[in-house]
Amino acid sequence: MPTPSILVVCKANLCRSPSAEVVLRAMLHDNGLARAIEIDSAGTHDVCASAPPHPAAIEAAKRRGYDLTACSARQVTPADFEHFDMILAMDRNNVADLRRIAPTSCKHKIELLLDYGDRHYGKEIPDPVGSDMKRFDLVLDMIEDGCRGLARLLVRAA
């Protein structure tokens, strides 16, 4: 059976999606599934290819025990739509951008990350770039909520 795979996506792949990648990986590791599920992140726009995550995202994550330093920005590719089983976006603009470029046969894979959240269910995770550290912390709260709910479902399915 092939390894299940999840792609988390924001606009530039500089703060929200690399944070979600690392948070989800950590939560799956805690449940013994880190190697059983492939996780990656990407952006809908080619803003800063190969750039490291935003310094404030790195700092907010570090304060909670997550390390974003191995991540680097990349843009979603056509192959991603075929490869990944789930494509989880941070906001509705990301969903719209993904659905615009996805093959029809893959559109069903695209959802909001917070469709798996409890506390922030169905909300959008705002882009914190240009905001203060409180906004980066809120974004991380929301990401943890969505990843926690998704991890629970993945653990049950394993």
Image: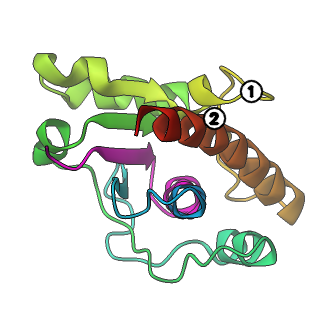
Q: Quadrant of residue 105?
A: top left
Instruction: Specify the farthest residue to the bottom.
Output: 69
Q: Three-letter amino acid code at disc 2?
A: Gly
Label 1, label 2: how far apart the Cα atoms are? 7 Å
Q: Are marks 1 and 2 in contact (CB under 8 Å)?
A: yes
Query: The C terminus is located in which quarter?
Result: top left
Image coords of residue 52 (percent x, y): 47, 78
x, y percent for residue 27 = 60, 56
Residue at left 55%, top 54%? 20
Residue 75 is a magenta residue? no
Residue 31 badge: none
Judging by the rendered image, the residue that carries numbered circle 2 is 149
Left or right, 72 with reference to 126: left
Q: In the image, which residues are magenta?
A: 1-24
- Return the x and y of residue 29 as percentages of the image width and height: 53, 64
Q: Determine whether the residue tagged by mark 2 lies in a helix, strand or loop.
A: helix
Image side of residue 144 versus residue 51, left or right: right
